[in-house]
Image (tube, helix red, strand yellow):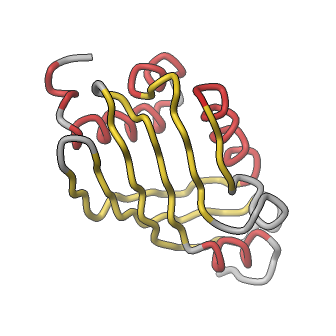
């Protein structure tokens, strides 16, 4: 990682770019081996990707679970604020649920904890009501 990536906001920009690329090497470079992912919301019976995912392998399982159930049409970062160890982003996401074909446009807050220039913790506070309704076929446009 370069010196610029030690800036927490730059780390998050690299994190999002690595996710878009899908390159496991790029992803590994911006994620701590002990990463904790908390996707807050009803347990996995409601949203299969909800819950806590531990370590790098858990993080990859989290990403694969989302990819299995969701087609991400777009994700736009609207705001980002941070300090030396934390960054909070507000994102707007347009998703299509694979099981129902329903689309949903939602906003979420992502809270990142940074350690040594890598994402150590990734917390997602999402509009689970809208996501769940689309996933279970009760909402869509």
Where residue 16 sits, quadrant-wise, is top left
Residue 140 percent coordinates (x, y): 69, 80
Is 122 rendered above or below residue 99? above
**Front-lying residue, 120 or 102:** 120
Horizontally, is 103 left or right of 87 in the view? right
Is 6 rendered above or below residue 76? above
Horizontally, is 79 left or right of 38 in the view? left
Residue 83 percent coordinates (x, y): 18, 48
**Front-lying residue, 54 or 139:** 54
**Front-lying residue, 58 or 103:** 58
Residue 129 percent coordinates (x, y): 65, 79
Where residue 65 sits, quadrant-wise, is top right
Where residue 10 sits, quadrant-wise, is top left
Is 139 rendered above or below residue 101? below
Horizontally, is 57 left or right of 4 in the view? right
Residue at image x 56%, y 44%? Answer: 37
What quarter of the picture does the C terminus occupy?
Answer: bottom right
Is 64 rendered above or below residue 71? above
Q: How many marks?
A: 0
Residue at image x 72%, y 68%? Answer: 42
Residue 99 percent coordinates (x, y): 83, 61
What quarter of the picture does the N terminus occupy?
Answer: top left
Residue at image x 50%, y 65%? Answer: 125
Residue at image x 43%, y 35%? Answer: 120
């Amino acid at each position: 990682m370069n010196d610029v990536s030690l800036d927490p906001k730059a780390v998050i920009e690299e994190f999002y770019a690595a996710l878009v690329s899908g390159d496991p090497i790029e992803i590994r470079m911006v994620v701590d081996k002990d990463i904790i992912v908390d996707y807050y919301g009803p347990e996995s019976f409601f949203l299969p990707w909800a819950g806590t995912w531990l370590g790098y392998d858990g993080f990859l399982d989290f990403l694969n679970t989302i990819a299995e159930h969701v087609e991400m049409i777009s994700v736009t970062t609207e705001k980002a604020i941070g300090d030396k160890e934390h960054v909070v982003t507000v994102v707007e996401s347009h998703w299509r649920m694979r099981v129902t074909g329903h689309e949903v446009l939602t906003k979420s807050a992502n809270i990142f904890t940074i350690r040594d220039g890598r994402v150590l913790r990734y917390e997602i506070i999402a509009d689970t009501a809208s996501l769940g309704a689309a996933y279970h076929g009760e909402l869509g446009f």
